[in-house]
Image (cartoon, helix red, strand yellow):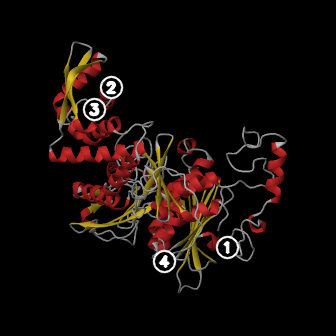
Amino acid sequence: MRIHQLPETLINQIAAGEVIERPASVVKELVENAIDAGASRIEIATAGGGKALIRVIDDGRGMDAEDLQLAVRRHCTSKIDQRLDDICTLGFRGEALPSIGSVARLTLRSRPADAAHANEISLAGGVPSPLKPAAANKGTTVEVRDLFFATPARLKFLKSDRAETAAITEVVRRIAIAFPAVRFTLSGPDRSTLDLAATGEDRLARIGQVLGAEFAANMIALDAMREDIELTGHIGLPTWNKANSLSQYAFVNGRPVQDKQILSAIRAAYSDTLPRGRYPVAVLWITLDPALVDVNVHPAKADVRFRDPGLVRGLLVGAIRQALLAGGDRASPSARADLVRAFSPADPVGNEQGMRGWSTSSPGFHRGGDSAGLAGSWAGQWAAAKSPSRPLDGTAPGFGEASQAEFETAVTPSGRFDQGLEKEPDTRHPLGAARAQVHENYILAQTGDGMVIVDQHAAHERLVFERLKTALREGSVASQILLLPEIIDLPEDDCDRLAERAEDLAGFGLVLERFGPGAIAVRETPAMLGETDVAGLVRDLADEIAEWDSTGGLKERLEAVASTMACHGSVRSGRRLTREEMDALLREMERTPGSGQCNHGRPTYIELKLSDIEKLFSRR
């Protein structure tokens, strides 16, 4: 076959293979066109996961008859002229509409504000129909039916209607965050209606619509700049994380992108604060000169290329880590809410349990008699407002707050063994004063307006981790020589890996050497770890090194090694602490950045306000 020119219809179908991957791609292109047209309200309707119908209606500027005919031809656009280094719109390639029309049945109806009537044009499998007048309001309506009917092979590989519907929803959510001044309505027989009212310039309000109201209570604001590249947005507390990366949103000059460089930088910034398999929440806006970024990487425009990727990555990692150090060590309000819910009484109506976690058949709940009947009658008859022991209006007699003043001068006996022996701890500290240790692992501390529950192992693990990182930066990790070297039996492969990195490990204060074909001799350990399980530490390090690239050195994984060592050198669960030790731990937590979570991402403490405690006892 000799070289020849392909027909226009086939050219469009080939181009559509890159631009239109699934129904969500159609929605993305059409919504972006509506935003570029200045729309303030966009309505999207779908059916059959977008395979049967996609309709997008906007109130933008609209197109006249001449523009409408050009809009369905390839490489016809109003958004750029001669240059690709000054793109300030979402679309610019002029391929979306002809690509959609080549693989589906496309109807385009549009009317400018000053026109007497609208005009309509249709394409079916790339074949256009004549332009004709139509009735329509100001703006544009695009209707896509029977997607991929002209390319059945692509249709066969689409996912289920439910999956395609979810993908469309995610596309609309991403664009909605980028443009809070636009109202978005997403509806159809295949979904629940999503209505996102315009919030003007209030980005946080729009983010709350998309990610939930709890985002505002669990976020840290970002505002940084480096060499004319501006980074703003909000990141979630490390203790408020997700099971996937779908809650990470990035926008470059207002364009929603899913760029691997940006996602990698976010992951690196949270590297020592999240549990394995968990992902942070982040909404980031990167603003820079359009000439410094290439958005013409792929027809889908989801990826971008920065002229200086190292600069952008450094700004992202540095700004996020700085924000986490400044505000990321506070307890997540969501954890407090979960704790309150765990203790709250259950709904008594139709519930056989009086309180959540208290079974009517549990030993000790009611000894002798019908415990289930007692619980049922108590749950149905008691009410806080009617209880004489709790006069909510302050007028009833008894032991209400108003009547307790008479008892203030009474002398009551005390059973405290330490009364008068030492000064009462100061509860004005942020984490309060230690009062007790529960189950040899949880420290209860009293603050000025509530209480704090601290996981002593997780908290001390973070403190040791930060001290170890500081020592590594200063090059002064002290080691202690073991009286007798500890010999650890390991598989030969693990011994080889550890021996190859013995010099790097010595920089951490861990001195080891090969001891035969299947053993390692440890001669020195980091001094700050104190007495530790040396065999467990070395085995864990061997397992971690086995997961890494064999060509990489430990210096590239400093924080991972430090994290493993800190875990083995921290206060173990089950160890009893004196009150002085508990208070010392609390004070060091207050001085240490990032102490709100351990280096595995678990929270180190939960704060419960006095108002929350009073609600549990119906005192407010």
In front here: 121 or 86? Answer: 86
Q: Which residue is mark 4?
A: 200
Q: Which residue is mark 1?
A: 403
Is 295 situated above or below 552?
below
Is 197 situated above or below 3?
below
Is 478 situated above or below 591?
above
Distance of label 4 from label 2 (alpha carbons) = 56 Å
Q: Nearer the viewer, mark 3 or mark 1?
A: 1
Element at badge 1? helix
Quadrant, the N terminus: top left
Q: Which residue is mark 2?
A: 539
Distance of label 1 from label 4 (alpha carbons) = 52 Å
In front here: 137 or 90? Answer: 90
Element at badge 2? helix
Q: Tag 2: residue type?
A: Arg
Q: Residues within 10 Å of mark 4 (few under 14, many from 20)?
A: few
Q: Visible in this render: residue 464?
A: yes
Pointers 1 and 4 in contact (CB under 8 A)? no
Q: Which mark is residue 235?
A: none
Q: Which residue is mark 3?
A: 549
Residue 376 pos. (x, y %)? 82, 50
- Ranked by sequence position, the earlier of labels 3 and 1 is 1
- Ranked by sequence position, the earlier of labels 3 and 4 is 4
The residue at 63%/63% (across/down) is: 615
Distance of label 3 from label 2 (alpha carbons) = 18 Å
Q: Tag 4: residue type?
A: Gly
